[in-house]
Image (spheres, rainbow, N blue to C red):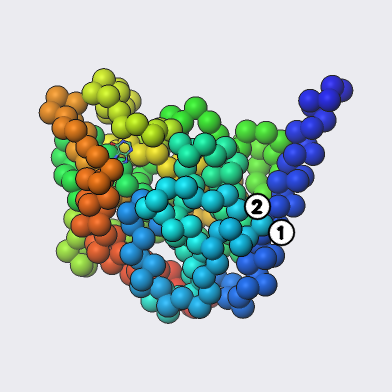
Protein backbone atom coordinates (compact mmCIF):
# COMPACT_ATOMS: atom_id res chain seq x y z
CA UNK A 1 0.00 0.00 0.00
CA UNK A 2 1.12 3.51 -0.71
CA UNK A 3 1.26 6.27 1.86
CA UNK A 4 -1.72 8.01 0.35
CA UNK A 5 -4.01 5.04 0.79
CA UNK A 6 -2.96 4.79 4.41
CA UNK A 7 -3.72 8.38 5.21
CA UNK A 8 -7.38 8.51 4.29
CA UNK A 9 -8.62 6.08 6.96
CA UNK A 10 -6.48 7.84 9.58
CA UNK A 11 -8.08 11.11 8.57
CA UNK A 12 -11.54 9.56 8.88
CA UNK A 13 -10.71 8.33 12.39
CA UNK A 14 -9.52 11.80 13.40
CA UNK A 15 -12.65 13.39 11.94
CA UNK A 16 -14.82 10.95 13.86
CA UNK A 17 -12.97 11.69 17.10
CA UNK A 18 -13.49 15.44 16.53
CA UNK A 19 -17.20 14.90 15.97
CA UNK A 20 -17.49 12.86 19.15
CA UNK A 21 -15.47 15.41 21.15
CA UNK A 22 -17.72 18.26 20.01
CA UNK A 23 -20.86 16.27 20.85
CA UNK A 24 -19.45 15.59 24.31
CA UNK A 25 -18.58 19.26 24.75
CA UNK A 26 -22.22 20.20 24.04
CA UNK A 27 -23.40 17.61 26.54
CA UNK A 28 -21.21 19.17 29.20
CA UNK A 29 -22.86 22.56 28.69
CA UNK A 30 -26.49 21.45 28.99
CA UNK A 31 -28.77 18.80 30.45
CA UNK A 32 -31.07 19.03 27.43
CA UNK A 33 -30.95 16.12 24.99
CA UNK A 34 -33.07 17.34 22.08
CA UNK A 35 -34.19 14.98 19.37
CA UNK A 36 -35.16 17.87 17.11
CA UNK A 37 -32.64 20.13 15.40
CA UNK A 38 -33.08 23.23 13.27
CA UNK A 39 -30.70 24.90 10.82
CA UNK A 40 -31.56 28.55 10.26
CA UNK A 41 -30.76 29.82 6.78
CA UNK A 42 -29.49 33.14 5.42
CA UNK A 43 -31.61 36.02 6.77
CA UNK A 44 -33.84 33.52 8.54
CA UNK A 45 -32.55 33.68 12.10
CA UNK A 46 -35.73 35.10 13.70
CA UNK A 47 -37.06 31.66 14.55
CA UNK A 48 -34.36 31.80 17.21
CA UNK A 49 -36.40 34.51 18.97
CA UNK A 50 -39.21 31.97 19.39
CA UNK A 51 -36.91 29.57 21.20
CA UNK A 52 -36.92 29.67 24.97
CA UNK A 53 -33.12 29.50 25.11
CA UNK A 54 -31.52 27.66 28.03
CA UNK A 55 -27.96 27.52 26.69
CA UNK A 56 -26.23 29.40 23.89
CA UNK A 57 -22.87 28.15 22.67
CA UNK A 58 -20.84 30.19 20.16
CA UNK A 59 -19.30 27.89 17.56
CA UNK A 60 -15.80 29.01 18.53
CA UNK A 61 -16.31 27.44 21.96
CA UNK A 62 -16.86 24.00 20.45
CA UNK A 63 -13.80 21.95 19.47
CA UNK A 64 -13.50 21.42 15.74
CA UNK A 65 -16.49 23.60 14.82
CA UNK A 66 -15.90 25.64 11.66
CA UNK A 67 -16.82 29.31 12.06
CA UNK A 68 -19.43 30.83 9.79
CA UNK A 69 -17.88 33.81 8.03
CA UNK A 70 -21.02 35.30 6.51
CA UNK A 71 -22.07 38.51 8.24
CA UNK A 72 -25.74 37.64 8.21
CA UNK A 73 -25.02 34.51 10.25
CA UNK A 74 -24.45 34.63 13.97
CA UNK A 75 -22.58 31.38 14.44
CA UNK A 76 -23.89 29.80 17.60
CA UNK A 77 -25.80 26.81 18.84
CA UNK A 78 -28.99 27.48 20.77
CA UNK A 79 -30.41 24.85 23.09
CA UNK A 80 -33.84 25.34 24.56
CA UNK A 81 -37.52 24.79 23.88
CA UNK A 82 -39.57 25.69 20.83
CA UNK A 83 -43.32 25.40 21.40
CA UNK A 84 -42.45 23.38 24.50
CA UNK A 85 -40.32 20.90 22.56
CA UNK A 86 -36.59 20.51 23.34
CA UNK A 87 -34.60 21.74 20.34
CA UNK A 88 -31.10 22.59 19.28
CA UNK A 89 -30.80 25.28 16.62
CA UNK A 90 -27.84 26.25 14.50
CA UNK A 91 -27.95 30.02 14.15
CA UNK A 92 -25.63 30.35 11.21
CA UNK A 93 -24.42 27.62 8.89
CA UNK A 94 -21.28 27.11 6.85
CA UNK A 95 -21.26 27.25 3.06
CA UNK A 96 -18.93 25.78 0.47
CA UNK A 97 -18.46 29.25 -1.04
CA UNK A 98 -16.79 30.36 2.19
CA UNK A 99 -14.00 27.96 1.36
CA UNK A 100 -15.03 25.12 3.66
CA UNK A 101 -14.77 21.53 2.54
CA UNK A 102 -17.98 19.50 2.38
CA UNK A 103 -16.80 17.68 5.52
CA UNK A 104 -16.43 20.99 7.36
CA UNK A 105 -19.81 22.25 6.15
CA UNK A 106 -21.50 19.12 7.49
CA UNK A 107 -19.45 18.76 10.69
CA UNK A 108 -22.24 20.28 12.83
CA UNK A 109 -24.80 17.83 11.43
CA UNK A 110 -22.50 14.92 12.31
CA UNK A 111 -22.07 16.38 15.79
CA UNK A 112 -25.78 16.93 16.37
CA UNK A 113 -26.68 13.47 15.11
CA UNK A 114 -24.05 12.02 17.48
CA UNK A 115 -25.60 14.16 20.23
CA UNK A 116 -28.88 12.29 19.68
CA UNK A 117 -30.86 14.14 17.02
CA UNK A 118 -33.55 12.22 15.15
CA UNK A 119 -35.15 14.97 13.09
CA UNK A 120 -33.69 17.97 11.29
CA UNK A 121 -35.62 21.01 10.05
CA UNK A 122 -33.73 23.16 7.56
CA UNK A 123 -34.42 26.59 6.10
CA UNK A 124 -32.68 28.37 3.27
CA UNK A 125 -32.91 31.32 0.90
CA UNK A 126 -33.27 30.35 -2.75
CA UNK A 127 -33.85 31.86 -6.16
CA UNK A 128 -37.16 30.90 -7.77
CA UNK A 129 -37.02 29.59 -11.34
CA UNK A 130 -40.47 28.07 -11.57
CA UNK A 131 -42.47 30.83 -13.30
CA UNK A 132 -45.36 30.30 -10.89
CA UNK A 133 -43.20 31.24 -7.91
CA UNK A 134 -43.04 34.77 -6.55
CA UNK A 135 -40.52 36.55 -4.33
CA UNK A 136 -41.51 35.92 -0.73
CA UNK A 137 -43.15 32.54 -1.40
CA UNK A 138 -42.23 29.52 0.71
CA UNK A 139 -41.36 26.19 -0.90
CA UNK A 140 -41.29 22.77 0.68
CA UNK A 141 -38.46 20.72 -0.76
CA UNK A 142 -39.76 17.52 -2.29
CA UNK A 143 -36.39 16.54 -3.74
CA UNK A 144 -33.02 17.98 -4.69
CA UNK A 145 -30.29 17.93 -7.31
CA UNK A 146 -26.68 18.09 -6.14
CA UNK A 147 -24.86 20.23 -8.69
CA UNK A 148 -22.06 21.30 -6.37
CA UNK A 149 -19.59 18.87 -7.87
CA UNK A 150 -18.71 17.87 -4.31
CA UNK A 151 -20.11 15.42 -1.83
CA UNK A 152 -19.56 15.20 1.95
CA UNK A 153 -19.55 11.40 1.81
CA UNK A 154 -16.46 11.20 -0.40
CA UNK A 155 -13.65 9.44 1.43
CA UNK A 156 -13.59 6.41 3.70
CA UNK A 157 -17.02 5.56 5.05
CA UNK A 158 -17.56 5.46 8.79
CA UNK A 159 -19.78 2.39 8.96
CA UNK A 160 -20.97 3.30 12.46
CA UNK A 161 -22.51 6.45 10.97
CA UNK A 162 -24.21 5.00 7.91
CA UNK A 163 -23.86 2.95 4.74
CA UNK A 164 -21.26 3.45 2.00
CA UNK A 165 -23.98 3.93 -0.60
CA UNK A 166 -26.92 5.55 1.17
CA UNK A 167 -30.31 5.50 -0.51
CA UNK A 168 -31.54 8.91 -1.68
CA UNK A 169 -34.93 7.93 -3.11
CA UNK A 170 -36.80 9.98 -0.51
CA UNK A 171 -34.49 12.46 1.24
CA UNK A 172 -37.36 14.62 2.51
CA UNK A 173 -39.58 12.78 4.98
CA UNK A 174 -43.12 12.30 3.72
CA UNK A 175 -44.79 12.47 7.11
CA UNK A 176 -43.00 15.71 8.00
CA UNK A 177 -43.94 17.18 4.64
CA UNK A 178 -47.57 16.31 5.28
CA UNK A 179 -47.36 17.99 8.69
CA UNK A 180 -45.90 21.15 7.12
CA UNK A 181 -48.60 21.16 4.43
CA UNK A 182 -51.36 20.78 7.03
CA UNK A 183 -49.93 23.56 9.16
CA UNK A 184 -49.54 25.91 6.18
CA UNK A 185 -53.10 25.21 5.08
CA UNK A 186 -54.49 25.71 8.60
CA UNK A 187 -52.73 29.08 8.85
CA UNK A 188 -53.54 30.29 5.35
CA UNK A 189 -49.91 30.31 4.23
CA UNK A 190 -49.18 29.62 0.56
CA UNK A 191 -46.70 26.78 0.33
CA UNK A 192 -45.13 25.78 -2.97
CA UNK A 193 -43.56 22.35 -3.36
CA UNK A 194 -40.63 21.60 -5.60
CA UNK A 195 -37.07 20.64 -6.37
CA UNK A 196 -34.03 22.50 -5.00
CA UNK A 197 -30.80 22.48 -6.98
CA UNK A 198 -27.62 23.21 -5.04
CA UNK A 199 -24.74 25.13 -6.62
CA UNK A 200 -21.49 26.25 -4.99
CA UNK A 201 -21.88 29.99 -5.62
CA UNK A 202 -21.07 32.61 -4.47
CA UNK A 203 -22.10 34.45 -7.63
CA UNK A 204 -25.72 34.30 -8.66
CA UNK A 205 -26.43 32.55 -11.94
CA UNK A 206 -26.26 33.81 -15.48
CA UNK A 207 -29.41 33.76 -17.59
CA UNK A 208 -28.07 30.72 -19.43
CA UNK A 209 -27.44 28.95 -16.13
CA UNK A 210 -30.96 29.65 -14.82
CA UNK A 211 -32.35 28.36 -18.12
CA UNK A 212 -30.24 25.21 -17.78
CA UNK A 213 -31.17 24.64 -14.11
CA UNK A 214 -34.86 25.02 -14.90
CA UNK A 215 -34.51 22.64 -17.85
CA UNK A 216 -32.95 19.88 -15.73
CA UNK A 217 -35.95 19.90 -13.41
CA UNK A 218 -35.28 22.35 -10.59
CA UNK A 219 -37.79 24.87 -9.24
CA UNK A 220 -35.37 26.84 -7.07
CA UNK A 221 -31.60 27.26 -6.79
CA UNK A 222 -29.48 27.86 -3.71
CA UNK A 223 -26.00 27.42 -2.25
CA UNK A 224 -26.65 25.29 0.84
CA UNK A 225 -28.81 22.53 2.33
CA UNK A 226 -27.90 19.61 0.07
CA UNK A 227 -24.61 18.69 1.84
CA UNK A 228 -26.39 18.79 5.21
CA UNK A 229 -29.28 16.70 3.91
CA UNK A 230 -26.93 14.09 2.44
CA UNK A 231 -25.13 13.72 5.77
CA UNK A 232 -28.36 13.76 7.77
CA UNK A 233 -29.76 10.98 5.58
CA UNK A 234 -26.48 9.08 5.82
CA UNK A 235 -26.97 9.06 9.60
CA UNK A 236 -30.65 8.14 9.35
CA UNK A 237 -32.18 11.46 10.42
CA UNK A 238 -35.60 12.50 9.19
CA UNK A 239 -35.38 15.76 7.24
CA UNK A 240 -37.76 18.58 6.40
CA UNK A 241 -36.51 21.58 4.41
CA UNK A 242 -38.14 24.84 3.42
CA UNK A 243 -36.92 27.51 1.01
CA UNK A 244 -37.82 31.17 1.08
CA UNK A 245 -37.89 32.49 -2.48
CA UNK A 246 -35.80 35.65 -2.27
CA UNK A 247 -35.55 36.52 -5.96
CA UNK A 248 -37.25 35.67 -9.22
CA UNK A 249 -34.86 34.01 -11.65
CA UNK A 250 -36.68 34.09 -14.95
CA UNK A 251 -33.98 34.10 -17.64
CA UNK A 252 -35.91 36.19 -20.14
CA UNK A 253 -36.86 38.86 -17.62
CA UNK A 254 -33.91 38.76 -15.26
CA UNK A 255 -33.24 41.73 -13.03
CA UNK A 256 -30.12 42.53 -11.05
CA UNK A 257 -30.19 41.22 -7.47
CA UNK A 258 -28.06 42.24 -4.51
CA UNK A 259 -27.50 40.43 -1.21
CA UNK A 260 -29.50 43.26 0.40
CA UNK A 261 -32.51 42.37 -1.79
CA UNK A 262 -32.11 38.71 -0.84
CA UNK A 263 -31.93 39.50 2.88
CA UNK A 264 -34.89 41.90 2.67
CA UNK A 265 -37.05 39.27 0.98
CA UNK A 266 -35.97 36.66 3.52
CA UNK A 267 -36.86 39.04 6.36
CA UNK A 268 -40.30 39.76 4.89
CA UNK A 269 -41.16 36.08 4.45
CA UNK A 270 -39.67 35.06 7.76
CA UNK A 271 -42.86 35.26 9.90
CA UNK A 272 -44.53 32.68 7.61
CA UNK A 273 -41.53 30.36 7.81
CA UNK A 274 -41.32 30.77 11.57
CA UNK A 275 -45.02 29.99 11.98
CA UNK A 276 -44.74 26.76 9.99
CA UNK A 277 -41.52 25.61 11.65
CA UNK A 278 -42.91 26.31 15.11
CA UNK A 279 -46.14 24.44 14.57
CA UNK A 280 -44.33 21.50 12.93
CA UNK A 281 -42.04 21.36 16.00
CA UNK A 282 -45.09 21.36 18.27
CA UNK A 283 -46.64 18.49 16.28
CA UNK A 284 -43.41 16.49 16.39
CA UNK A 285 -43.30 17.01 20.16
CA UNK A 286 -46.87 15.80 20.52
CA UNK A 287 -46.19 12.67 18.48
CA UNK A 288 -43.04 11.90 20.47
CA UNK A 289 -44.81 12.22 23.80
CA UNK A 290 -47.35 9.62 22.65
CA UNK A 291 -44.62 6.99 22.35
N1 LIG B 1 -29.12 31.65 -6.92
C1 LIG B 1 -28.43 30.94 -6.05
N2 LIG B 1 -28.62 31.05 -4.75
C2 LIG B 1 -29.54 31.90 -4.31
C3 LIG B 1 -30.29 32.68 -5.17
C4 LIG B 1 -30.05 32.54 -6.56
O1 LIG B 1 -30.68 33.20 -7.39
N3 LIG B 1 -31.13 33.44 -4.42
C5 LIG B 1 -30.88 33.12 -3.14
N4 LIG B 1 -29.93 32.18 -3.07
Give the residue pinned by disc 1. Answer: 21
Task: Report which quarter residue 116 is drawn in.
Answer: bottom right
Identify the secondary structure beneath mark 1.
helix
Q: Position of residue 65 (x, y in %)?
A: 60, 53
Residue at 40% of width from left, 39% of height from top? Answer: 223
What residue is shown at x 50% (from left), y 78% (from top)?
54
User: Splitting the image into four quadrants, where does ligand 1 fall?
Assistant: top left
Total numbered badges shown on the rendered structure: 2
- The numbered mark, 2 or 1, whose residue comes first in the sequence reads 1
**Residue toward you, 281 or 92:** 92
Residue 27: quarter of image: bottom right
Residue at screen point 22% across, 37% down: 257
As drawn, 212 above or below 256: above
Q: Position of residue 108 (x, y in %)?
A: 57, 53
Nearer the observer: mark 2 or 1; the answer is 2
- Residue at the limit of the structure toward the right, as seen here: 1
What crowding class fits label 2: few (fewer than 14 Cα within 10 Å), some (14-19), or many (20 or more)?
A: some
Residue 230 appearing in the image: no
**Marks 2 and 1 in Cβ contact (< 8 Å):** yes
Residue at (65, 42) in percent of width and height: 163
Say which residue label 2 marks.
64
236 lies left or right of 10: left
Residue 63, placed above or below residue 260: below
- Look at the numbered disc 1 and say if its residue's Cβ is closer than 8 Å to ligand 1: no
Above/below status of 36 relative to 240: below
- Asked if residue 163 shows in the view, the reply is yes
Amino acid sequence: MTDASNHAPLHAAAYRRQVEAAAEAIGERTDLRPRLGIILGTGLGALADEIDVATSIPYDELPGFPLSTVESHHGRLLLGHLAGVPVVAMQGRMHLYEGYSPQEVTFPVRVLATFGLETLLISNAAGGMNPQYRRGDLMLLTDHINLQGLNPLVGPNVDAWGPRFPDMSAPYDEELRRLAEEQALAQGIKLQQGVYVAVVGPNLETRAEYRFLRLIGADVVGMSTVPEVIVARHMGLRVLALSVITDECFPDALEEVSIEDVLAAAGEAEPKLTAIMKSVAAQIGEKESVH
